[in-house]
Structures are given as C-alpha cells and as structure tokens.
Image (cartoon, rainbow, N blue to C red):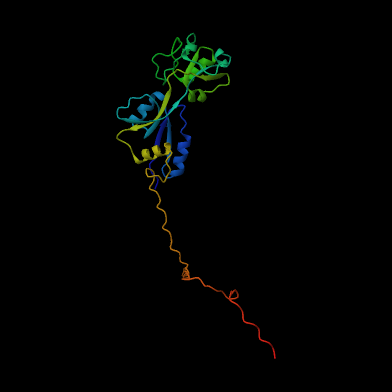
Amino acid sequence: MTAPPFRLGYVPGVIPGKWVRTWNDRFPEAPLTLVQVPAADAEALIRDRAADAALLRLPIDRTGLHAIPLYTETTVVVFPKDHLLAATDEASTEDLTDSVVLHPLDDTLDWDRPPGEEAFERPATTGDAIELVAAGVGLLVVPQSLARLHHRKDLTYRPLTDAPESRVALSWPEDETTDAVEEFIGIIRGRTGNSTRGRTPTPPEPKRPDSTPRKPAKPKPTGTAKHRSGNQTGKRGKPRKRS
C-alpha cells in the first residue's frame, strides 16, 4: 500500500537533494513531493497546509510554528568582475558606502538599515536585482547560495564580513508533528534508519547453539612421574657372560 506523499516546501538557494535521496531510499512506499516557493511565501505555505513542512529562511513569525535552525549562510556582495572590489578577498559594509546597493523586495537579510546608497526603486526579486547589477546599476548583498543560484560569467562576489547572516530552518505547524515530519527531522540530523527515533530497529538474530559435540576435557595428571620409559636414571645390571 502506498503511503500519502510527504510535501516539502523549499525556498530558492536551499538545496534539499541529499535529504530527498535519503528519504526515497528509506521510504520508497511514501513519495516525497517538492514544492518550490518564493522566500516571502514560505511561511504562508505551511500555515495554509499546502506543505507538511518547509525549508525556509529565518526570521519568521513562530506563532503556531516549530522551527529548527539547520545552518547559517555566508553573506556576500555581488558586483561586476571589473569592479574595484574584485581586487579584495572580502569586503565590509563601509566599502559600500559610496555605491548604490540594490534591496529587492524578496530580500531575507534582517537589516537595521541596508548599506550604501538607496536605489531609485526596489527590484521585485533577487533575479531582477542580478540583472541590474550586470547592467552596472548597483551592487547586491545576498546569501551566498543565491549568488551561486544566479551565477553569471560577468559577475562575481566576495564575503561581506559585517552583514546580517541568513539562517535556514525546517519549519512545520506545531499541532502537526506527524511521523513523516519526525522521520524527515531524523534524516536531516543524520540518524540512521535503525535509530530509536527512526524506524523500529531490527532485533539481532539469536545465536544458534553449536550442534557439534565437544570432546570431554582430559583429566589433568595429579602427580609427576619420576621416571619415563627409555629415560631411567638408575644403574643398569652387568651383562651376563655367554657360556
């Protein structure tokens, strides 16, 4: 019997492939369905029960939701390859003071105030912002996975040392911690299929008794022979003369 699919939402830049492969190997009877969603809509996706859980970016409103932080991404600044920042190994927000820094509407970095000069208008998406960077309009600060996702040959990036970082988390409704959710949490945390929180471990087979009869042990001698045959130490008698 086929189990209902486990619906997993994920936002751009998050790559759930290794966890999905483990799920499919471990639970072939319960397919995992991926649902890609814009970062701004990920929270609503699970609140509306359009997915059982989602890999999203923090912060979110955690009212009624569980959220397990998984990892933190490096924040980078994206710029044309001929920009002065290309000569550095890393940058700071102070290095962006005199540059236009694009701030797309789907930005997930928790800024008090974005660095640099404000653009005339905010791009709708990170993808739109990347196109503007390539056109020389300004720079863009994003999590490193998004810089890789929107890679272009004419653009490059450097770590931004003092910028907010993006945290990726697994989130799901508080009142719906199902067995499938527990299993996926176990996969993310590296638990094996036979762990106590995964599938019921297979008990080891009892050892079979040895059917080969054992020979009884020889009794140990209670004393030590003083003499052995052919190795006596007493004097021999004289040989008799032949008549």
In this view, the residue in front, 87 or 6, is: 87
45 relative to 213, above or below: above
7 relative to 85, above or below: below
Please give left or right for residue 131 compared with residue 112 in the image. right
Q: Position of residue 176 (x, y in %)?
A: 31, 36
Residue that protrudes farthest toward the right in the picture: 243
Residue at position x 55%, y 16% in the image? 88
Residue at position x 47%, y 39% in the image? 21
Q: Position of residue 220 (x, y in %)?
A: 47, 69
The quadrant in which the C terminus is found is bottom right
Residue at position x 36%, y 29% in the image? 45
Residue 38 visible in the snapshot: no
In this view, the residue in front, 196 or 139, is: 196
Q: Position of residue 17 (x, y in %)?
A: 48, 35
198 relative to 76, above or below: below
Residue that protrudes farthest toward the top in the picture: 98
Please give left or right for residue 174 compared with residue 119 in the image. left
Residue at position x 32%, y 27% in the image? 62
Please give left or right for residue 11 compared with residue 240 in the image. left
113 relative to 177, above or below: above
Picture quadrant where residue 26 is located: top left
Residue 188 visible in the snapshot: yes
Q: Position of residue 138 (x, y in %)?
A: 50, 12
Picture quadrant where residue 39 is located: top left
